Image: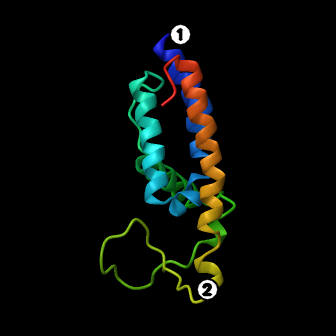
Amino acid sequence: MPKKHLNTVFHALVMSRLQYALPVWSGYLSVELTGQINSLLKRAYQYGYSCKLHTIENIASEADKSLFDKVLSQRHCLHGLLPSMRAYGCLRPRGHSYDLPSCTLELHKNPLSHDACISIYDGFFTRLRYWMVCTSGLPVL
């Protein structure tokens, strides 16, 4: 299969699943899981599945920026949840001009269990590694 088609299939099957709700779960990635995702993306690039070498950090930062830019639009459903605009001068440059809310409740500090996130994505990456090995014809590592 030509590289262009492999790239299309890789983005349709793998990258779309990685990017699904990424701004929500990327903050809960451990260093170990980040390394596993990055090694998977690096292997996909080496085997020719992807035309560009991706890292989960770059994908997550692009997704965060994209979501925030969309929320800034008046027509977005989450725009009404933004805090009020800052009334005082800017002490240091930021990517927005909103007041930052203070979090005082423990409930809002840990909305998801770290172990639950890891167990969900460990199963996904096991299946993804199996698919890559089966389609590449290379021996299982």
**What is the crowding at mark 2: few (fewer than 14 residues within 10 Å), some, or many (at least 20)?**
few
Residue at image coords 56%, 34%:
129
Residue at image coords 44%, 84%:
87
Residue at image coords 58%, 42%:
125
Say which amino acid is labelled 1: Met
> Which residue of the protein is positioned furthest toward the top in this rendering?
1
Name the residue that disc number 1 marks.
1
The location of residue 6, given as percent across then percent down, is 52, 19
Q: Secondary structure at mark 2?
A: helix
Residue at image coords 48%, 60%:
30
Front residue of 1 and 123: 123
The location of residue 7, given as percent across then percent down, is 50, 23
The location of residue 63, given as percent across then percent down, is 51, 50
Name the residue that disc number 2 marks.
106
Instruction: Looking at the image, tell me whether mark 1 or mark 2 is earlier in sequence order.
Output: 1
Q: Secondary structure at mark 1?
A: loop
Q: Are marks 1 and 2 in contact (CB under 8 Å)?
A: no
Above or below 1: residue 22: below
Task: Tell me: 134 left or right of 139.
Answer: right
Front residue of 108 and 134: 134
Front residue of 1 and 119: 119
Task: Tell me: 54 left or right of 105.
Answer: left
The location of residue 106, given as percent across then percent down, is 61, 85
**What is the crowding at mark 1: few (fewer than 14 residues within 10 Å), some, or many (at least 20)?**
few
Above or below 71: residue 122: above
Q: CA–CA distance between discs 1 and 2? A: 52 Å
Say which amino acid is labelled 2: Glu
Task: Tell me: 26 left or right of 115.
Answer: left
